[in-house]
Amino acid sequence: MIPVLLILVPLLAGLASFFFKNDKAVRSWALIASVVTLVVSVLGLTVMKTTGNLEYSCEWIQSLGSRFSVKLDGMGQLLCLLNAVAYPLVILATWNSSYKKPNNFFALMLLAQAGMMGVFLSTDALLFYFFWELALIPMYFLCSQWGGERRIPVTFKFFIYTFIGSLLMLIGIIYVYAHTKDHSFSMESFYNVSLARKDQYLVFWLMFIAFAIKMPIWPLHTWQPDTYEQAPTATTMILSGVMVKMGLFGVLRWLFPVVPFASFQWGDFVTSAALIGVIYASLIAIKQDDLKRLVAYSSIAHIGLMCAAAFSQNLSGLQGLMIQLFNHGINIIGLWIVVELIERKTGTRKISELGGLAQKAPALAIMLVIVALANIALPLTNAFPGEFLMFNGIFSSHTKYSMWFIVMAGMGIILGAVYTLNMIRKVFYGDTNELTTNTQDIRWNEKLALGMIVVAIFWLGIYPQCILNETASFSAEIAEKIEVVKQYFDK
Amino acid sequence: MNALLLSALLGVIMMFGGILLQSKAAVRNLAIGGLCLLLVVNILEMCGTVFFRFDTRGMMVFDNFALLFNTIAFAATLVYLLLSARDMEKVGINYAEYFALIFFILCGITLTSSFKSLLILFLGIEIISIPLYILTGSDKRNLKSNEASLKYFLLGSFSTGLMLMGIALVYGTSGTFDTTRIGAFTATAPSALMIAGMMMLLFSMAFKASVAPFHFWTPDVYDGAPTVFTSFMATIVKAAVFIAFIRLFDDAFGLQNKQWRLFVGILTVATLFIGNITAVFQQSVKRMLAYSSIAQAGFMMLALYAMNTDAKEGLLLYSAAYSFATIGIFAVLIKMKDYTFEGFNGFAKQQPLLAATTTIFLLSLAGIPLTAGFLSKFYMLKATMANGKNIWLVIFAVLMAAVSVYYYFRVIQAMYFKEGDGHRIEISPAFKWTLVALAALVILLGVYPDLLLRFLYY
């Protein structure tokens, strides 16, 4: 029941939003709907956590052997929760932004949420593909309609990029489907299929390209900074906070268990690309003057590290990744909120034009510093346990290059500290100038949104075990599957 | 059998209707009523109620596949008439005759969907083609329309000649017109003469289906013909030709696929490539749709290449998805004064509902999930990839599908994201709601295709 509700609530609320006329009304409606989704999601984690409640399945397209089956498992729980948490935060934090035709804006936002929920929940490959695309279409309209000046070509690039990726993934899905014994798209059949080594390589690349574009990892990342910059900030928050997780999610759910051989064989290659991306993106981030682009590149660096941890394919790396999937979402939404506030209050995003904000907006400054420190994974913040476990995973992974990988990943962390602290220094400290002298501090709704993020940062920094417990069995399953392959190679 | 007789009869009735009925509305209502009757009668036949029974001596077979396609074709024509019948008035004075010609074409379609003999195939193709030549040239004062008609007629006759030659050669070697017996004959001894005949049939059918490199007439004819009739030609007629195509090669030459499969593969790749790449460079939406119809034909060719159960099911779904979406877009296009992409600028502000439905149709053509277009493309890919073969062909096809996103989305971008002066267009509520219903149908088929396909195994 719970998974169906998680999809239905935002879907229906989104469709209803199209018919609203009043700006305030549609905002409140979207906020209420997203809070309801959050409540449902929390219920699924706590009191209604029984197998009967967490699974649903019914006939869909019989002639194809596809069912409408959805399930909340460890990783799904986590990402659905992230998706559910993100929306109220985003709506609250951007309450004061004004949009042309707000009813369409919020309707599309909620539809995107429904799509992403579906991605995280579906246990049928065709259904997964359906939702994968469905999440993309509202995003396309959101970014093209409400974004910055260059929004149309930039969003189109983003769309074409991801669309090519997903079509290739579709071929991969059909390919695996053709080899399943019972001709079904269900996850079990996909997991039980045993492909020849050569077929595995093919399927791996067909599917991984889609996921790599979505994450994005170097060198397929070129759509990302432009899109993040041009999209309306609320959309960027969802894109970077939740949507990019779809890529990593896809790798863990539909790639590793289905083609373990190929995933293991190509692991070093992918890890190298991801880590090159970490350093590359960090170096570019240092030189950025635009706050939005800086955060965008910082996101590439973080995702690259997470991808490397995924391909370390051991329990520690995977568990770290799980924590980080959630935390990165929270932290980056926090960063975007701060960027959005700065832009709205001063009218600029250029770091060189800002300065001295701490004197004028102390609350904002405190929040930013906390979020920024979480972004560079200081102990006590939520990113620390995640990154620690991920580093441990990369270091103890089965490859002979683990030493190199750990050095590269470590470089990324150091560079991350450079650009983040630099940004804080230039934006918040120093002298005020004519743009920043009249800045006012943040309002209560913004304080509330940022406050919740700060609470989450400390809570998960001190007690990450709650996430680890939830995902332990799931990570163990994947690690086990890969372990079999490793042993095969050791012989 | 019901539909075959009735459609011919309705054609004749419409011809006389033009003389007897004074008002255009009466003619239109007669045609729409007749078509509804045709649809109902055909559905009744699917359920087992046959009104007319006569011995075709095994030359035709009304199986579920044929009847289901007839239903799709009639339903699409009904939607087409509901949306665009009013706009035919602008073409010329012979209003009733256009309907008569359309009914004759439908009669030809029932022949091509259910033939068992090469003679019937030939008859069907000719009955489809000749009214089309007339419809293409129906805008008599327009030079482009005349040119298109003449071009279509000359090239079409040539390809018909080729087809006759092919039939003669096949008959000469096998001694029969019956497709099943030809199939049995080719299983044992495919002689050179037989292969030559088969190739001629392949090429002439490829011409009729506007498959590259036999597609050169398509853009000019589609562009030159009055837009109302382009809509009909590019959708229902094209789908019917494909149904005939797959029937012919399944029944008669299915066992001989070694000889033709490579050719069909090459034609498929060429069609996908030329259709999609050329469509990118078009400035007029009408011409873009002409090339898009070539591109979609490339996808339908995949069914021919794969030639299995999935392919046949998929082709039915494809023809429904493609026809409905394209008819919808054309219906909106006809109302526009300016056929260029810029003509659509700011359309969403002026007509939000129309823009939304057009977007759904475009998404369906591009093959985005939740629309019928996605599942029909999916069926094609799945059929082609049965047993994990032909992976490169499939990869090529999806890359071309990604290219198609470019030109379909240009219309969406113009409608939604660009500012336009927007000349007002007059839209009746009936038109609007028909379009909404059609969009709902496209989505319904995209979510639940069994709605259509289960009738195959009724």
Image: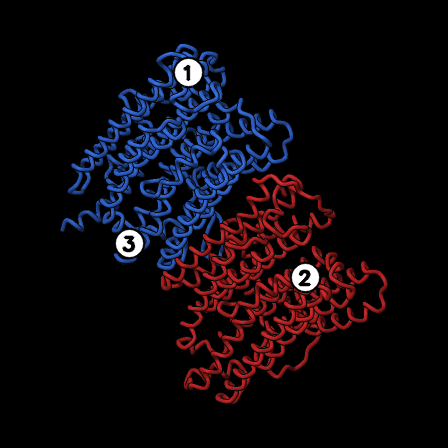
Chain colours: A blue, B red
The correct choice, above or below, for B71 with respect to A348 in the image is: below
Q: Nearer the viewer, mark 3 or mark 2?
A: 2
What amino acid type is highlighted by mark number 2? Pro
* Residue B146 place in picture, x, y as percent: 67, 68
Q: Which residue is mark 3?
A: A201
What amino acid type is highlighted by mark number 1? Leu
Question: Residue at the location (30% across, 21% down)?
Answer: A421
Q: Which residue is mark 1?
A: A364
Chain ID of residue with mark 3: A
Crowding near pointer 1: few (<14 within 10 Å), some, many (20+)? Answer: many
Question: Which residue is at the front of the view, B180 or B296?
Answer: B296
Question: Which residue is at the front of the view, B288 or B173?
Answer: B288
Q: Quadrant of residue A251?
A: top left
Q: Secondary structure at mark 3?
A: helix
What amino acid type is highlighted by mark number 3? Tyr
Q: Secondary structure at mark 2?
A: loop
Crowding near pointer 3: few (<14 within 10 Å), some, many (20+)? Answer: some
Decide: marks 2, 1 in contact (CB < 8 A)? no
Q: Secondary structure at mark 1?
A: helix
* Residue A438 place in picture, x, y as percent: 48, 12
Q: Which residue is mark 2?
A: B226
CA separation in Å, label 3 and label 2: 51 Å
